[in-house]
Amino acid sequence: MISSFLMSVMSVEFDVGGSKGWIIPSSKNGQLFNDWASKNWFNVGDTLRFEYKKDSVLLVTNEEYDKCKSSHPLFFSNNGDTVFKVDKPGLFYFISGVAGHCDRGLKMIVKVLEPESPPPPPSSNETSGDGVKEAGTISSSTLVVLMTMSFFGALFFM
């Protein structure tokens, strides 16, 4: 439970396109960035770092992505080192704003996963109508025994 909490709090910075950055793909791989994006798991709070020279990054709608053109992007940057923080789950459509670059494959769809919601905490005295504790609850004495066994088991295997 603690590890899932820590994982949900941690964010990751992704270098878009890996070491090559946000560049026009070779004619052999027009899906370079979508291939890269599909190999990664993106979560709310993660950041995407776009590194490029003489280009730009636009966040656009699905329709603008398909047309490789946007007159009013949702986000625009052309400073050569752009960091975009993902603030919600869903699909994000990125294109180059330089004429012809998007048509040559400088575009990408990023799927951001829904955040996991933690299970509700069990109440300490969950019982059924007949006064019997529900399955899945652990008494405090059982918890102490399990923790003690885990502690000594860890010592034994070190």
Image (tube, rainbow, N blue to C red):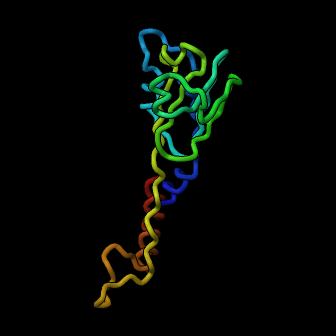
Q: Residue at left 62%, top 34%?
A: 75
x and y percentages locating residue 38 in the rendered image: 42, 31
x and y percentages locating residue 18 in the rendered image: 54, 24
Q: Report whether 148 appears left or right of 85.
A: left
Q: Tell me if residue 95 comes above or below residue 153 in the rendering.
A: above
Q: Tell me if residue 147 comes above or below residue 7 in the rendering.
A: below
Q: Residue at left 41%, top 10%?
A: 28
Q: Tell me if residue 14 comes above or below residue 156 in the rendering.
A: above
Furthest toward the left, the residue is: 130
x and y percentages locating residue 12 in the rendered image: 57, 40
Query: How many numbered circles does the render carry?
Result: 0
Furthest toward the front, the residue is: 71
Q: Is residue 41 shown to the viewer in this render?
A: no
Q: Tell me if residue 153 comes above or below residue 72 in the rendering.
A: below
Q: Residue at left 43%, top 74%?
A: 122
Furthest toward the top, the residue is: 27
x and y percentages locating residue 119 in the rendered image: 43, 65
Nearer-the-camera pick, 15 or 82: 82
Furthest toward the bottom, the residue is: 130
Q: Is residue 38 shown to the viewer in this render?
A: yes
Q: Report whether 126 appears left or right of 67.
A: left
